[in-house]
Every structure is written in structure tokens, then in C-alpha cells.
Amino acid sequence: MTEVLGSALSIVILYSLLIVEGLVVAGCLRLAFRRPAVGDAWFRKVEAALSGLARRRRLSVAAVGLLALAGRAALMPLLPMREPLITDEFSYLLAADTFAHGRVANPTHPMWVHFETMHVNHKPTYVSMYPPAQGMVLAAGKALFGHPWWGVWLSAGLMCSAICWMLQGWFPPTWALLGGLLAVARLGLFGYWMNSYWGGAVAATGGALALGALPRLLRHPRARDAVLMGCGLAVMAASRPYEGLLLGLPLAAALAHEFIMQRRRPLRLSLTQVVLPLVVTLAGTAAALMYYNWRSTGDALRLPYQINRQTYVRAKYFPWDPVNATPIYRHQSLRDYYVTWQYQRAEAAGSAAGFVRNALTNAGFFWLFYLGPALTLPLVMLPRVLRDRRMRFLLAAAAVCAVGLLLNLWFLAHYAAAGTCLLYAILIQCLRHLRCARGENRQRGPALARVVPVACVAMLGVRLAAQPVAKFLALDHPATWFNTTAGNLERAGIRDRLLALGGRHLVIVRYRPEHVWFTEWVANEADIDRAPVVWAQDMGEMGNAELLRYFRDRRHWLVDADAKPAQLLPYPEASTVER
């Protein structure tokens, strides 16, 4: 009984903000039903001010992005830049460092077996396995402001602006502004898209540009909007290509139906104003990505991602994938990740029942990040939206994206980033129907619709107040504004300590049997030989000998990464150095 109560208490503490959000929504709903006129005059003044801003479309788009940027900048004293922690983050940072050096890929290091880590290729070249867009954004942040995180910051602000711009193409400007502000509250401040190096905002921006261009092209074809759609598709192809394809297919079908099947406009106009700019933009993107693949893998049609899967991955990603033969793992941390965790989870999802359980789990993660109690409320009007003829395309596109995501056995919130614009479009239309729900009192509909922004603003205040105890909350990657961890501070502290000593260093990382795979310490810069600190896997006394000889001009260190705290010691039998 004591264990059950302890587990229940742990869950309550862990998900306390989610519980608070549910209580806030419930309290606001109760007030909206019982006293719908409360605050009506004040709300009308705020809505009138926002309507005035919304009518200036360009200004409102800029204001949304600037609000996200200024709001996150104001949080810096409470929420400083995160140190990388997750293996994916180190991979993206490698891409950023590669681009910052003016290279697409790096040559294979002669000692590469000592530097193997998750999500990084060492043959035929030393590169991140991921598409280039996120790395380019991080490289831009480093070039402009001296740190890669500022690229994340800029991309999140652009995402919020792009969502507002997209919604302007589908809805009245006031509702588009509201959608942009909701994106700032839910995605642009506390979520991991803003506070880590994983990405999400880049693909979401691409999706918003592509979807926002569609209604503009259908109403009045212009080359500018065709180029914007092409740029959106290009960004998705260079960040989340599979999910971008899921959104791109409905867009292509809509354009084909309008300009080929319907032919409401002269064919020449369609070709010059839509097809030609779109084809030129996409052809340029394809050429650039093929060049990137060629420099990274030696084959223009082979992605670094495919090389990584062939080299390290045994697990299925889709139900129809074949199970690869067990690769050669030279380090236990890689085996723990690819076999003990990833392969076993994929096998559990292999049966029909397992697939359903896995899909439900993924749907739960989607709900935690994108909706929560506050944004679930508008979905009570989804049955009415489903009958709305103006929403048919958006709903069909959302269905295609949802099916495609469910077929993937793996899910994190940024996997669905390209379709974020679809979700916000559906939510805004649900809110519009909710506001028109009169019932017994003509003020009840507006009061119910106001619950959503009020709850979101209230939760921002709650989240700020909870920052001192944020380490007890759920991690930010299942939930949009929960705890953004400070990252691997121990690794960062040892790095800074060695940099303060001056000179160049080789750090051999030793793990204990209880090591948790996602806290991988071995991650290096693009130019390993010139890096002031080089991190390497411990391969035993005999295995390490060749590495020590190669880096004989460096100080040699050993890190016990799983000690509490992590310990930095001179490497045994090396020359005496300062601890």
C-alpha cells in the first residue's frame, strides 16, 4: 500500500502542471457557464485592440514573432541557454560546426573507432546523420551571435510569425493573430523547440509557409506565393523529409485539381505564375540536397540517414521494414541504445496488439505536447468542423499526416512539426464555432471561447512561478512547457575546466554498467585534431594505447562519467598533470 501511495504521489508531483492546467480550465469553464458576462467589457476592449493590430497584417505577423523572441529573451535570467544533453543534440551541433567551417562534410578521422557515438556517421565521411536544415540554423546562430542556441531562438520566432501568416490565408485576421499568440504561449517560450537543439521550429516554419501559400495561390496566383510554397517545401525536405512529404502530397493534389482539372484560369497564367516558380524553387532544392548527399555519402541519392541505419540500426522504423542483421558494436553504450532499448521496443510493437499500444502511446505524447487540457477544449466543436465544407482540405491533409505518423513506430513531438500549421488551423476553426455557440445565453459562446487564451496565459504565470522547482516536473519533450533541463552540466563543467587550464586535452570517457544511454559524453567538433578538447570512448588499456600515441602531444585524462559527481582524473600511466 505504501508503495502504491508513493507511486501515486510521484505521478502527481511529476505531472502537477498538467493537473493544474486541467483545474484552471475546469474553473474557467464553470465560471463561463455560471457567469458568462464576467469581465465581458474588459475582454471586448482587449479584443478590439487586437483586432486593430490584426487588420495590419504584416505588422501583426512581425509582432507575433517579436513577442516570442522578446519573451524568451526576458526569461534568460530564469532559463539560461541549455547545455546539450541528448545524443541528437550533439549530432545537430556537429552539423552546425561543420557548416561553420565552410564544409559540407568532414574526412574520416584515422582514429574514428574511438569517437563513435549515436546519430553520427564516420564513414564514408564524418557527418551528422540528419538532414542539414537544423544544422544550418545552428550555424547561423553561431555566426551571427556567437552561440548556436541563438539560431534556435531565431527559428522559434520565425515559426510563430509563419503560423500567424499561414492562418491569415485561411481565416479572418483577428483569428489568425489569436492562433499566432497561442503558438507563442505553447511553443515559443518553455517548450523544447525553443530550449534545446533538437529542432521542431524549422520544420514547422516550412509547413506553415507551404500551407499558407496555398489559399493565396488559389485566390490570386502570384509568383511570390509560389516561391514561398516552394521554400516551405524545401525547408521540410531539408529538415523532416518524410513528414514534409506527408504534407506536400495533399498540397500537390490541391494545386493539380485547381490548375489542371478545374482550369478556372488560363493555362499560361498557371504555368508562369505558379508552376514555373514552384518547379524552379524545388529543382534548386533538389540539386542542393543531392550535392549534400554526394559530399556526405558519395551517392547523390543516398542520405546520411540511410548510411547510419545500415551501419548501426537493427530495429524497425515502420511495420514493413526488414529486421537488419545485428551490426558490429565496438562500444557498450551504442549496443545499449540500438539493441537493448531501440530493438526491443520495436519488437514489442511488432504484433497487432503491440502496434496499437505503441500508437496509443505516441498519440498520448502528441496530446501532451500539442494540446493539453487548454487546447483540447476547442475540440468539442470538432464534429461541427467536420461538416464544414471550407475545412475539407485541411481535414483531409491532417488525416494524411496523422496516418503517416501512426505508421512510424517512433514518435517525438518534432516528428509532427511540419503539420503544426494544420493543427492550429483546425483549433482556430473549432474556436470560431465555439464562440458562436449560443445556447441559453448569447454571451456563453464568447465566454467559452475566451477560456482557451485565458487558461494559456494563466499557465504561463504558473510555469514562471514553478521555475524554482522545475527539476521535479516532467521533461519538456513530452509536454510543451514543462521542465527544460539545464543539460549535461557535468560534461560542460569538465570541458570548461580543461579549457581554463589551457593547452590541448584528450578525455577518455569510461561508463559504469548502470550507464543510461542518452547521456552520451562522447561528442566532438568537426575538426577533431584541432579541437582543444577531444572526447573518446574507453576501449580498455590495449585499445586506448593507439589513441594515446596518436595524441601524444595532448594531456590525457580519464572521466568516470557515472560517478556522483563525475570524476576527472589523469589517465593512468600518463605523465603527471594537474587534476
Image: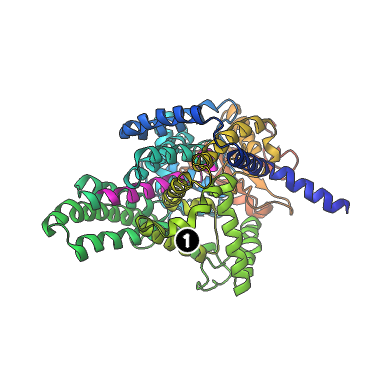
Q: Is residue 302 left or right of residue 444?
A: left
Which range of residues does the magenta coloring cover? 192-216
- The spot of residue 332 in percent (x, y) is 66, 58
Element type at mark 1: helix
Along the line of sight, the residue nearer the viewer: 336 or 409: 409
Q: Quadrant of the N terminus?
A: bottom right
Q: Residue at x 60, y 66 (%)?
A: 346
- In the rendered image, residue 304 lying in the magenta stretch gets the answer no
Q: Is residue 79 visible?
A: yes
Q: Where on the picture, by quarter, is residue 266?
A: bottom left
- The spot of residue 11 in percent (x, y) is 74, 48
Along the line of sight, the residue nearer the viewer: 130 or 72: 72
Along the line of sight, the residue nearer the viewer: 333 or 158: 158
Residue at the disc numbered 1: 402
Q: Residue at x 59, y 69 (%)?
A: 355
Q: Is residue 222 left or right of residue 295?
A: left
Label 1 Cα crowd, 10 Å radius (few <14 / some 14-19 / many 20+) = some
Q: Magenta stretch: dominant SS?
A: helix
- In the rendered image, residue 202 lying in the magenta stretch gets the answer yes
